[in-house]
Amino acid sequence: LDEDSLKSDTMKKSFDNLAKLVKYVDPNFSGRDWNLATAMVIKGDALVQVMGDWAKGEFHAANKTPGTDFLCYRFPGTDGSVIYNSDMFGMFNVPDDRKAAQVALATATLSKSFQSAFNVVKGSVPARTDVPDTDFDACGKKGIADLKKANEGGTLFGSLAQGYG
């Protein structure tokens, strides 16, 4: 981490804004699982949730429609930038006669058709930027466009939670 960045006015403003937001959360928010917080929004027990696009899968499972029952948007002030988390598959070092199966799995999961089908159900956007957005809803189309734009503009960042950075 860059010490000058951590001490910057921008960082201070970020924490000042976070302190303002904390005033709007309920007293039991700390440690609540994201899916439980999502359920609160779905049921009308909470107004808003700051969460990744994967939460959209919970809304779909509850038969909620984007644009009608819920909205998807970038956090205010972050337009043009995207922080991503990625699904990962760990593979063991195996004998040569088993490596073809690992390659087949990796190839299948990275195919355009799998990336589309998986992410439509999950509610997230594909890891690949060349997957057509045809099967995605309005939130998915926006997420795909935002990801492509951030990738092209150099404002696509891996999450520190997953060790990027």
Image (cartoon, rainbow, N blue to C red):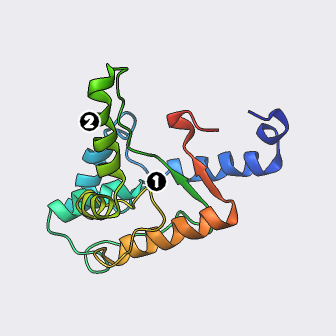
Please tell me the numbered disc located at residue 24: 1
Residue 73, placed above or below residue 111: below
Estimate the x, y position of residue 75 in percent, counting from the top left.
Answer: 53, 62
The first of marks 1 and 2 along the sequence is 1
Query: Which amino acid, mark 2?
Result: Ala
Tell me the crowding category of disc 2: few under 14, some 14 to 19, or many 20 or more residues within 10 angstroms, Cα based: few
Q: Nearer the viewer, residue 61 or 76?
A: 61
Q: Nearer the viewer, residue 135 or 26?
A: 135
Provide the residue designation for mark 2: 101
Element class at badge 1: loop
Residue 43, placed above or below residue 14: below
Single out the residue that lies furthest toward the front.
Answer: 97
Residue 45 makes an appearance in the image: no
Residue 164, placed above or below residue 43: above
User: Which residue is located at x 37 percent, y 75 percent?
Assistant: 133
Residue 15, placed above or below residue 82: above
Estimate the x, y position of residue 137 in percent, counting from the top left.
Answer: 30, 76
Tell me the crowding category of disc 1: few under 14, some 14 to 19, or many 20 or more residues within 10 angstroms, Cα based: few
Residue 40, picture quadrant: bottom left
User: Which residue is located at x 57 percent, y 66 percent?
Assistant: 76
